[in-house]
Amino acid sequence: MPIAPNRATPLLAAVAGYVDTLGFVALFGLFTAHVTGNFVLIGAELARPGHGVLLKLLAFPAFIAGVVVARLIALVCEGRQSTSQRWLLGTQAVLLIAFMAAGLVAHPAPQSDAPWVLLAGCLGAAAMGVQNATGRLPLAKLTPHTVMTGNVTQLVIDATDVALRRAAPGTRERLRKLLWPVLAFGAGAMAGAAAFMQIGFLALLPAVLVVTWLAVVRIDVEEAALQRAA
């Protein structure tokens, strides 16, 4: 039975926050799901050389590779007139498993340019590249669930309008739809950091299970389209 988007979106947002923060804590400040953050860190490394710039440089093409793979999968599915979301979420789950395996071999990492550390970072970035692309392809009708800057901005604008009693029709409903992914992302981020400190890279297992479950049950994008139109 398909899962409703108001349940799936917070789960995807929690996965994004969880994996991104776990990668940041485990891999010398690497953002696996946040390209902008890695650009900032690369710039900081160039200004004040320390360690970790190679890992962040390699993560960018790995993220792009994940997006390209996702697009190719989506195009093949379009040619067969079938939905791609199960294939894309399944691909992300496989990449997260590979990320976990490489991380288990790498940990504890002596330095950021160790081969297994670089591989783990690239696999994590590729996995989140797939999730970002999935949010733009078969799940484009859902509330964005990987980067929260736009969500938080719109959330604050809508909350301000509601507080000032200037809210347009549909504002309160959009406010509710934005609130849960933002809260889930934040909760996922805290959980990812805490879980890694307790059990290391095995902490990626919950993210793998959530993504796999979403791939199996399927997300009801038709309902999402109706919610956006409302």
Image (cartoon, rainbow, N blue to C red):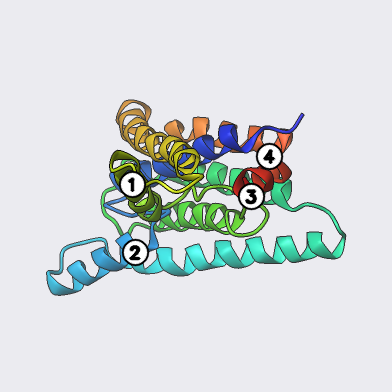
- Report the residue that reaches farthest toward the right: 80
Quarter location, residue 3: top right
Quarter location, residue 74: bottom right
Alpha carbons under labels 2 and 1: distance apart: 29 Å
Point 33% across, 50% down: residue = 157
Which numbered dot is residue 36? Answer: 2
Alpha carbons under labels 1 and 3: distance apart: 21 Å
Point 45% across, 45% down: residue = 171
Q: Give residue 227's position: percent from left, percent from top.
A: 62, 43
User: In terms of depth relative to the viewer, which is nearer, 119 or 32?
Assistant: 32
Mark nearest the camera among 2 and 1 is 1
Q: Please tell me whether residue 74 is drawn above or below residue 193 in the rendered image.
A: below
Quadrant including the C terminus: top right
Quarter location, residue 181: top left
Marks 2 and 1, the one that precedes in the sequence: 2
Q: Is residue 176 left or right of residue 139?
A: left
The residue labelled by disc 1 is: 161
The residue labelled by disc 4 is: 219
Point 87% across, 60% down: residue = 80
Marks 4 and 2, the one that precedes in the sequence: 2
Marks 1 and 3, the one that precedes in the sequence: 1
- Report the residue that reaches farthest toward the front: 165
The residue labelled by disc 3 is: 229
Q: Is residue 182 visible?
A: yes
User: In terms of depth relative to the viewer, which is nearer, 210 or 119?
Assistant: 210
Q: Residues within 10 Å of mark 4 (few under 14, many from 20)?
A: many
Alpha carbons under labels 3 and 4: distance apart: 17 Å
Mark nearest the camera among 3 and 4 is 3
Q: Give residue 90's position: percent from left, percent from top.
A: 67, 45
